[in-house]
Image (cartoon, coloured by chain):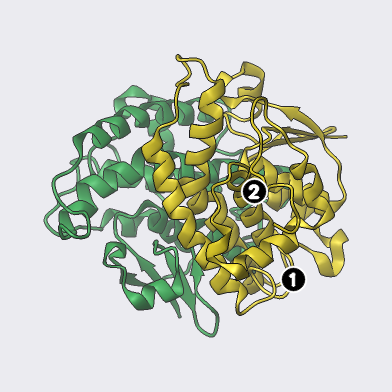
Chain colours: A yellow, B green
């Protein structure tokens, strides 16, 4: 049994859901509102962030990067040629560079702002920092997303997938973060056709289906969110 | 030959310098002022951050976390019992959790603010964002460092090293970030004797010596910075 503590629009949780999907693991999803700072959750992950993976008879595995490395170490070889963190150390550098790019840089510049301001703050109490979105943060994130989209387009013009010839953690991290932003209608897809066609390829994978079914109370996803031919 | 593009007070560069020291690798250090956004450097690391490791006949390895994983994969087994990322996947989870804690959380909450405001901005032009330090950011960082120090003390009361019985990447990451803050005189060591005694142990390692010799133009380190019995 695999439990995943997550939030539907948390981009790091989405990355791990895609990874688990590619491994053929169907987790038991447990929604965690990190801003409530639940004591039992903080004991599993003192950093207080989603996702946290819990397997039978093993200590909790907190954090998207750590979970991805753990799953590669424990199940990676089972994927054979489809391994998401490739075998060679040099190829792994490029996958980790881009996984870090999206999990840290894109998150700090884009997806953290948008998800916090437009989703989390709507459900937080005033004490927790809830309230109307800070539109300055939203505007900065909407501006930043454009150069990340161009960077994806730039990479995909010379490679089949983001980090090389095969699908990797880099693609799943990038698509996960973009999917949270796309739910909110804030990805200017028309600005880069190459990036858009890469995203359409990731979005059509079976591992992506559960993400497209996500709904957050009171929120309607953008019209293109579930459309595979957006 | 191993080149390391770094900045003397960049905490991520310091982490990798400690790691290389533990591996017995003496890098050729090349100072990089990331805020100058030098084209050749951006080609090696499009994220524009230090450190970047360059070995003969191999592509550049950018980013502290990626370099640490790469060195473990290429040289880790050579350390035998002293391997800095332990063999077992569950033990690796704890090391990676804490390595991430310091490289991302401590950086975002403490060391990034202090190094940027008190060091980088002094050398930046007005166009690059230079000028007097933002004292609000400095105050927030000085307040945040206290709970991280308590967390180190809490862990060390039940373990010999941060992530378990042996020295690991977790200790080197934590000590690297703290050393940048200590250079600036902003670690309230008196608040946690356990954390202080752990830091003294890391600081007395041979791998730490080159860091204690660092000087930044026009800056004098805090009186306790080089003192092993601070």
- Looking at the figure, which quarter contains the N terminus of chain A? top right
Q: Is A168 rendered above or below residue B90?
A: below
Q: Is residue B110 left or right of residue B158?
A: left
Asked if labels 1 and 2 share a chain, the reply is yes
In the displayed orientation, state which residue is furthest to the left.
Answer: B218
Residue A68 percent across, percent down from the top left: 70, 50
Of pointers 1 and 2, the one earlier in the residue sequence: 1
Q: Is residue B22 visible?
A: no
Q: Badge 2, how many Cα within 10 Å: few under 14, some, many 20+?
A: many
Q: Is residue A230 left or right of residue B49?
A: right
Quick one: SS at disc 2?
helix
Residue ID at (75%, 28%): A30
To which chain does the residue with label 1 belong?
Answer: A
Quick one: SS at disc 1?
loop
Q: Nearer the viewer, residue A178 or B7?
A: A178
Q: Is residue B141 left or right of residue A115?
A: left
Q: Nearer the viewer, residue A102 or B143?
A: A102
Count of numbered circles on the image: 2
Q: Is B155 rendered above or below residue A99?
A: above
Q: Which residue is mark 1?
A: A166
Residue A127 percent across, percent down from the top left: 45, 14
Q: Is A140 rendered above or below residue A55?
A: below
Q: Badge 1, how many Cα within 10 Å: few under 14, some, many 20+?
A: some
Q: Which residue is mark 2?
A: A179
To which chain does the residue with label 2 belong?
Answer: A
Q: Is residue B35 left or right of residue A63?
A: left
Quarter-of-image position of residue B39: bottom left
Residue ID at (50%, 60%): A148
């Amino acid at each position: 049994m695999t439990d995943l503590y997550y939030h539907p629009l948390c981009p790091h949780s989405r990355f791990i859901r895609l990874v688990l999907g590619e491994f053929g693991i169907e987790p038991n999803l447990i929604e965690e509102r990190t801003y409530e700072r639940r004591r039992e959750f903080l004991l599993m992950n003192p950093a207080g962030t989603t996702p946290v993976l819990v397997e039978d008879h093993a200590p909790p595995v907190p954090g998207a990067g750590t979970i991805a490395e753990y799953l590669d170490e424990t199940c990676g070889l089972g994927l054979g040629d489809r391994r998401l963190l490739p075998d060679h150390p040099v190829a792994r550098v490029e996958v980790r560079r881009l996984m870090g790019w999206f999990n840290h840089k894109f998150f700090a510049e884009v997806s953290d702002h948008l998800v916090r301001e437009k989703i989390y703050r709507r459900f937080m109490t005033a004490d927790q920092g809830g309230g109307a979105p800070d539109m300055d943060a939203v505007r900065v994130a909407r501006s930043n997303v454009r150069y990340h989209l161009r960077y994806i387009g730039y990479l995909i013009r010379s490679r089949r997938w983001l980090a090389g010839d095969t699908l990797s953690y880099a693609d799943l991290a990038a698509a996960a973060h973009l999917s949270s932003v796309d739910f909110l209608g804030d990805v200017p897809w028309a600005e880069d056709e190459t990036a858009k066609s890469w995203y359409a390829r990731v979005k059509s994978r079976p591992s992506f289906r559960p993400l497209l079914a996500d709904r957050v109370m009171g929120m309607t996803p953008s019209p293109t969110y579930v459309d595979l031919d957006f």
